[in-house]
Image: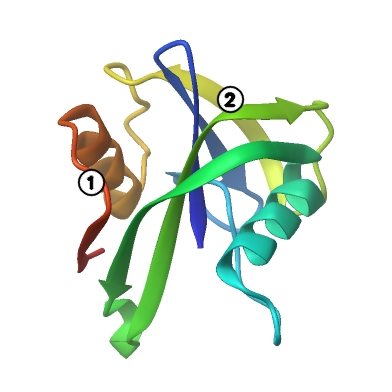
Amino acid sequence: MRAMLLKENTILLVKHTYHDSWYLPGGRMKKGEIFEQAIRRELYEELDCELHSIRLFGVYNSFNEYKNDSIVIFYSDDFSLSGKTDGEIERYDFFKLNKLPEEVSMGTRKRIEEYTKGYTSNFGLW
């Protein structure tokens, strides 16, 4: 589960302590959670981020590492961030949509490209 957090033609990306690439923020669901609860919890825990409004961007399947994971992507341009992070996030930053860092993960880059081309509510491969 991931979120695209956008403000003024920029997108927030995170670098985890355990990955070299930049990703959309997010994480896993806990037992009994619905998608919206999970993404709100994950962003609050990792980034002290409060989502004021969100909408579904798309649902994707990932077959990396011989798994069949479903990845739900949300979109928000109405959120607040305190600047605090937890131990999982090495750092975060906002990047212009047309000037992403080279180290962006493949799936993240694909979702951002879809967003900039106007695609929404996609169901496809991660």
Q: Quadrant of the C terminus?
A: bottom left
Q: Quadrant of residue 61?
A: bottom left
Name the residue type under label 2.
Asp
| x and y percentages locating residue 110 in the rendered image | 23, 46
Q: Nearer the viewer, residue 105 or 53?
A: 53
* Left or right, 121 with reference to 92: left
Tell me which colouring the rendered structure shows: rainbow
Marks 1 and 2, the one that precedes in the sequence: 2
| x and y percentages locating residue 81 in the rendered image | 75, 28
Residue 20 appears in view: no
* Left or right, 77 with reference to 50: left
- Say the numbered circle drawn on residue 60: none
Q: Nearer the viewer, residue 113 or 78?
A: 78
Q: Badge 2, how many Cα within 10 Å: few under 14, some, many 20+?
A: few
Name the residue type under label 1.
Lys
| x and y percentages locating residue 32 in the rendered image | 70, 85
Residue shown at 39%/14% (left/top)?
9
| x and y percentages locating residue 60 in the rendered image | 29, 67
Residue shown at 70%/87% (left/top)?
31
Residue shown at 68%/39% (left/top)?
51
Name the residue furthest top.
8
Q: Badge 1, how many Cα within 10 Å: few under 14, some, many 20+?
A: some
Name the residue furthest left.
117
**Callout 2: SS:** strand
- The residue identified by callout 2 is 93
Residue shown at 37%/27% (left/top)?
101
Q: Nearer the viewer, residue 74 or 15?
A: 74
**Callout 1: SS:** helix
- The residue identified by callout 1 is 110
* Left or right, 93 with reference to 97: right
**In this rendering, is residue 116 above or below 45?**
above
Mark 1–mark 2 distance (CA, rounded to whole Å): 19 Å
